[in-house]
């Protein structure tokens, strides 16, 4: 029935979601945000040329040379731009003569990667530089805390994290899982989608309840999938996919929906009892 029914040796995921030690416990209002009955996501709308300026852009420490044109396009649509630690080196090195045009609002991290002369350059351009030395949370999580505290007055529709998949040019899988963990953590703080994108791939968290995903931009690639990364999803139903789920259980070591694809409709719907990771390709040549 499914194109991809994968059976692996079960790998414990107990260490994937770490406690949030320094954030307040979610209030009933915050819980309602995460368990809302229905929501609509438009994951690739930020690629549309006529898209309103309503995204917040976060740059992570990944190679950006190959997508520098796309980065510039996103920057011009962003209300707020933030860099996480070593990402500022990549930004500085990749922009060359265009550095003065693309100045981030915020740079944060423990600064074990950012070069001092690069930080000084952006300080002199007016960028806020904040050292976040706490090692219980990753730099991405800490950066998002700061971003969310600074965009309260802005009409931000989503947060697009550029370079969020792969972590770094060295292929740090631990960074990728840390970034996914941040998606879980931010559910308690913001009722906005957070997208991780780079290299033609996008991932985001689909919360429990009913979600409609619009796939009508023309930039959608062929492949998509549903991954039960935070634990088992006991009841998942979809429409709009070639291999749909019908109230089925997703679980590592049992069934996961990878290498799925679209039927050609303008939207996909997902009903799930537990948060599930949505993955999709994008095809964009600036």
Image: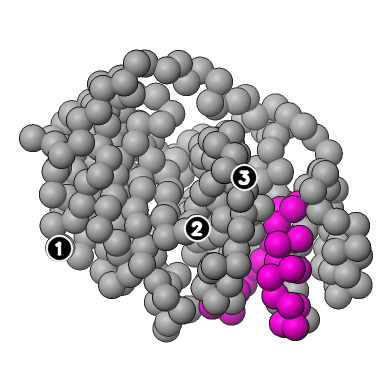
User: Which label sits in the foreground, 1 or 2?
Assistant: 2
Contact between labelled residues 2 and 1, with CB atoms less than 8 Å apart = no
Provide the residue span drawn in magenta.
73-99
**Which dot marks residue 182?**
none
Q: Find the residue positioned furthest to the front.
A: 170
Contact between labelled residues 2 and 3, with CB atoms less than 8 Å apart = no
Mark 1 vs 2, N-terminal side? 2
Q: Nearer the viewer, residue 34 or 141?
A: 141
Q: Where does label 3 land, which residue?
A: 170
**Please, what secondary structure does the residue beneath circle 1 have?**
loop
Whether residue 159 sits left or right of residue 137 in the image: it is left
Q: Position of residue 65 (x, y in %)?
A: 60, 67
Q: In 3D space, how far apart are the residues under numbered discs 1 and 2 (Cα atoms)?
A: 24 Å
Magenta stretch holds residue 79 = yes
Whether residue 262 sits left or right of residue 183 in the image: it is left
**Which dot marks residue 264?**
1
Whether residue 198 sits left or right of residue 123 in the image: it is left
Q: Nearer the viewer, residue 68 or 24?
A: 68
**Please, what secondary structure does the residue beneath circle 3 have?**
loop
User: Which label sits in the foreground, 3 or 2?
Assistant: 3
Residue at 16% x, 31% y: name it: 247
Residue 148 visible, this angle: no
Q: Find the residue positioned furthest to the left.
A: 1
Residue at 13% x, 57% y: name it: 263
Check the image and report above or below for 129 versus 37: below
Q: Where does label 2 land, which residue?
A: 198
Mark 1 vs 3, N-terminal side? 3
């Amino acid at each position: 029935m499914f194109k991809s029914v994968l059976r692996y040796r079960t790998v414990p995921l107990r260490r994937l979601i770490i406690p949030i030690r320094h954030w307040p416990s979610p209030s009933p209002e915050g819980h309602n945000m995460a368990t809302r009955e229905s929501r609509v996501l438009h994951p690739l709308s930020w690629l549309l040329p006529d898209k309103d300026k309503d995204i917040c852009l976060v740059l992570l420490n990944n190679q950006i040379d190959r997508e520098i044109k796309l980065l510039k396009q996103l920057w011009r649509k962003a209300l707020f731009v933030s860099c996480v630690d070593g990402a500022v080196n990549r930004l500085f090195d990749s922009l060359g003569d265009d550095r003065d045009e693309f100045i981030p609002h915020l740079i944060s991290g423990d600064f074990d990667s950012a070069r001092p002369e690069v930080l000084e350059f952006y300080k002199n351009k007016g960028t806020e530089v904040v050292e976040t030395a706490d090692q219980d949370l990753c730099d991405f999580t800490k950066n998002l805390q700061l971003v969310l505290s600074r965009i309260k007055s802005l009409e931000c529709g989503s947060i697009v994290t550029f370079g969020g998949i792969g972590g770094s040019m060295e292929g740090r899988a631990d960074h990728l899982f840390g970034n996914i963990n941040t998606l879980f953590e931010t559910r308690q703080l913001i009722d906005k989608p957070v997208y991780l994108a780079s290299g033609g791939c996008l991932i985001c968290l689909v919360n429990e309840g009913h979600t409609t995903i619009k796939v009508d931009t023309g930039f959608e690639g062929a492949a998509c999938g549903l991954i039960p990364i935070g634990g088992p999803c006991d009841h998942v139903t979809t429409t709009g996919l070639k291999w749909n789920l019908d109230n089925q259980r997703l679980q590592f070591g049992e069934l996961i929906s990878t290498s799925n694809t679209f039927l050609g409709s303008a939207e996909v719907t997902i009903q799930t009892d537990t948060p599930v990771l949505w993955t999709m390709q994008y095809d964009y040549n600036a």
